[in-house]
């Protein structure tokens, strides 16, 4: 679970799900640690991602038909793959 958490954090770093925030600052602001709009669901999201990924990846192997270098990203409200997520799922043989 520790390793999985590192994989999730690295994925969030490389492919930030919220790539931009449209907000205008009207006066100088001194930001505290994570700032005043820090995500309240952060810990819950991490727990849920770990449970979900561990449950799925224990039984299935996921295969992408595209190399990472060919990903075309689209920065919308959240970051997306322009052409969607084309993955194949195969049951693991134990
Ligand atoms: C990986 C999952 C998540 C990511 C990447 C994420 C990302 C973010 C980001 C970037 C912000 C700041 C937005 C801004 O500055 O305007 C934010 C705020 C917030 N998030 Fe999340 N979030 C996630 C999961 C969740 C979940 C699961 C919940 C609820 C259960 C949640 C509830 C909120 C709320 C209520 C705020 C607004 C806080 C405020 O403005 O006072 N988030 N989130």
Image (spheres, rainbow, N blue to C red):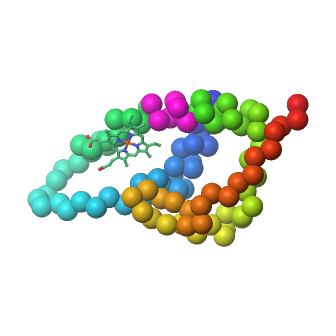
Give the position of the C terminus as an image quadrant.
top right
Q: Is residue 12 visible?
A: yes
Q: Is residue 6 above or below residue 1?
A: below
Give the position of the N terminus as an image quadrant.
top right
Q: Position of residue 27 (x, y in %)?
A: 11, 59
Q: Is residue 67 above or below residue 58?
A: below
Residue at image location 56% in from the left, 62% down from the top: 81
Q: Which residues are magenta?
A: 44-49
Q: Is residue 41 magenta?
A: no
Q: Position of residue 47 (x, y in %)?
A: 52, 30
Front one among 49 and 26: 49
Front one among 26 and 54: 54
Front one among 87 and 10: 87
Would residue 22 be found to the left or right of residue 27 on screen?
right
Q: Residue furthest right?
A: 94
Q: Position of residue 3 (x, y in %)?
A: 64, 35
Residue at image location 24% in from the left, 43% down from the top: 36
Q: Quadrant of residue 68?
A: bottom right
Q: Is residue 46 magenta?
A: yes
Q: Quadrant of residue 51?
A: top right
Overall secondary structure of the magenta section: helix
Q: Position of residue 66 (x, y in %)?
A: 72, 64
């Amino acid at each position: 679970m520790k390793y999985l958490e590192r994989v999730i954090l690295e994925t969030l770093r490389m492919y930030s799900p919220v790539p931009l925030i449209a907000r205008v600052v009207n006066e100088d602001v001194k930001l505290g640690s994570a700032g005043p709009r820090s995500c309240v669901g952060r810990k819950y999201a991490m727990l849920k991602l770990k449970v979900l990924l561990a449950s799925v990846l224990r039984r299935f192997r996921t295969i992408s038909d595209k190399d990472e270098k060919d990903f075309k990203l689209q920065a919308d409200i959240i970051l997306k793959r322009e052409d969607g997520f084309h993955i194949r799922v195969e049951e693991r043989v134990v």
